[in-house]
Image (cartoon, rainbow, N blue to C red):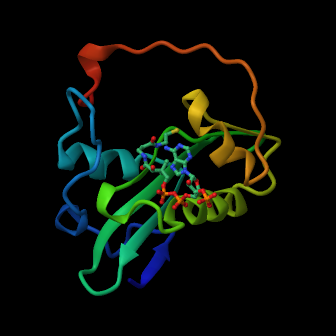
Amino acid sequence: MKIRYLTTLDSISESDLAEGFFEGWPDPPSYPNFIRLLHGSSHVVLAVEESSGKVVGFINALSDGVLSAYIPLLEVIPMYQGNGIGQELVRRMLELLNGHYMIDLMCDAELGGFYEKIGMHPSGGMILRNYKNQSGM
Ligand SMILES: CC(C)(COP(=O)(O)OP(=O)(O)OC[C@H]1O[C@@H](n2cnc3c(N)ncnc32)[C@H](O)[C@@H]1OP(=O)(O)O)[C@@H](O)C(=O)NCCC(=O)NCCS
């Protein structure tokens, strides 16, 4: 399997996104909303599988352009997990965000080790989830 990584959406449309993202979400965003949220991000890294041309993994970030960036989403579709794509997406995103003072994300405790491997460390956080909006505004 050969993966190439993109940091722009110039050549990407909805039909380039593989099936299977937002696994386990009760009310996932539609793919038009998926494309919209990528375009609304300040930074994206996409993992594209060379032979199919499909996006099989992505990470996005929202930056204020001065101090802070937040990483809301990281996902590799199940068939491609366990091949180092997730780590590479994070590594490339941290490279893009180099220069920011704060780079934050929220994750389940069992993923702590995954992010620690790449230099992040645990902290506290507060969240609010409006489940009625889970599929997008
Ligand atoms: C988390 C996720 C992006 C990892 O992607 P991936 O391509 O499978 O990850 P990698 O192959 O780069 O894994 C690298 C390492 O992290 C570990 N790891 C991967 N997923 C993990 C998980 N869910 N929990 C704990 N460790 C995990 C792997 O065991 C591997 O460790 P190793 O190098 O010691 O073998 C992927 O499992 C996923 O999309 N999950 C669903 C969405 C999600 O949870 N996103 C994160 C939101 S904070």
Q: Which of the image's four quarters has the N terminus?
A: bottom left
The vertical placement of 51 against 35, above or below, is: below
Q: Is residue 65 visible?
A: no
Residue sitting nearer the eye, 60 or 83? 83
**Point 54% across, 50% down: residue:** 42
Q: Which of the image's four quarters has the C terminus?
A: top left
Residue 3, quarter of picture: bottom left
Residue 96, quarter of picture: bottom right
Q: Position of residue 87 (x, y in %)?
A: 59, 60
Q: Position of residue 86 (x, y in %)?
A: 52, 58
Q: Position of residue 113 (x, y in %)?
A: 68, 43
**Point 41% across, 85% down: residue:** 2
**Point 77% across, 57% down: residue:** 98
**Point 58% across, 33% down: residue:** 110
Marker count (numbered): 0
Q: Is residue 49 visible?
A: yes
